[in-house]
Amino acid sequence: MPSTNPVNDFMGFTPTAKKTSAEGNSLGQETFMKLLVAQMRQQNPMEPSDDKEMIAQMTQFSILEQLTSVAAASEAAATSGSIQQSLAVIGHDVSYKNADGTTGTGVVEQMSFVDGKPVLKIGGVDGISPSQITQVR
């Protein structure tokens, strides 16, 4: 059954469509602007949108943009802190807990990056996250 909502038609949405990815669930800047333009195109010239409503929408967009910036900065700071902690333990004897609950020990030999996050090589075992370390000696 075709959609009767011009905004849905413009954006390619269907009422029953569900997105499964985290990225698909967020309203990005480009999507917001497309919705705003579609809304303006579809408004009745005899009954234009209320200017207060337009200001409220632009304020919401501005808040969304600022929250996105804060989240990105926060993630960058967390990654930076994790890198610094990883570098600080290189050459130290550590204990760590594996995903299956077992523990391991060894000297931190190196740090590398997987998907932009630091991982350690401890006692010949690769792929250990700094958050798995339970003790540094």
Image (cartoon, rainbow, N blue to C red):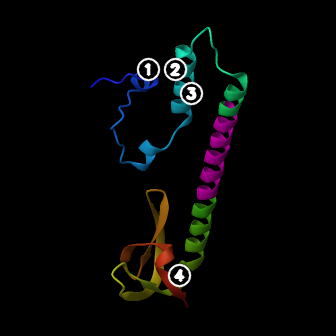
Q: Which residue is mark 1?
A: 6
Q: Say which mark, if any, is on residue 51.
A: none
Between marks 1 and 3 in the image, the one whose residue lies nearer the viewer: 1
Q: Which type of secondary structure does the marked residue at label 1 adopt?
A: helix
Q: Using the numbered discs, state the Cα–Cα distance from disc 4 to disc 2 in whole angstroms.
A: 59 Å
Disc 3 marks a residue whose amino acid type is Met
> What crowding class fits label 2: few (fewer than 14 Cα within 10 Å), some (14-19), or many (20 or more)?
some
Query: If you read the primary sequence from the N terminus, does the residue marked by circle 4 or circle 2 appear first?
Result: 2
Q: Say which mark, if any, is on residue 91.
A: 4
Horizontal side of residue 66 vs 14, given as left or right: right
Q: In this picture, is 65 found above or below 126?
A: above
Query: If you read the primary sequence from the N terminus, does the residue marked by circle 1 or circle 3 appear first?
Result: 1
Q: Which residue appears farthest toward the left when viewing the image?
A: 1
Q: Are the two marked residues, 4 and 2, in contact with CB atoms closer than 8 angstroms?
A: no
Q: Which type of secondary structure does the marked residue at label 2 adopt?
A: helix
Query: If you read the primary sequence from the N terminus, does the residue marked by circle 3 or circle 2 appear first?
Result: 3
Q: Which residue is mark 2?
A: 38
Task: Residue at 57%, 62% (x, y): give it.
Answer: 79
Q: Are the two marked residues, 1 and 4, in contact with CB atoms closer than 8 angstroms?
A: no
Q: Position of residue 103 (x, y in %)?
A: 39, 88
Q: Position of residue 64 (x, y in %)?
A: 63, 42
Q: In this picture, is 117 found above or below 97?
A: above
Query: If you read the primary sequence from the N terminus, does the residue marked by circle 4 or circle 3 appear first?
Result: 3
Horizontal side of residue 72 vs 2, given as left or right: right
Query: If you read the primary sequence from the N terminus, does the residue marked by circle 1 or circle 4 appear first?
Result: 1
Task: Residue at 69%, 33% (x, y): give it.
Answer: 56
Disc 2 marks a residue whose amino acid type is Ala
> Is 60 covered by the magenta stretch?
yes
Q: Which residue is mark 3?
A: 33
Q: Are the two marked residues, 1 and 2, in contact with CB atoms closer than 8 angstroms?
A: yes
Q: Which residue appears farthest toward the bottom when viewing the image?
A: 137
Please provide the residue range marked out in magenta.
Answer: 58-76
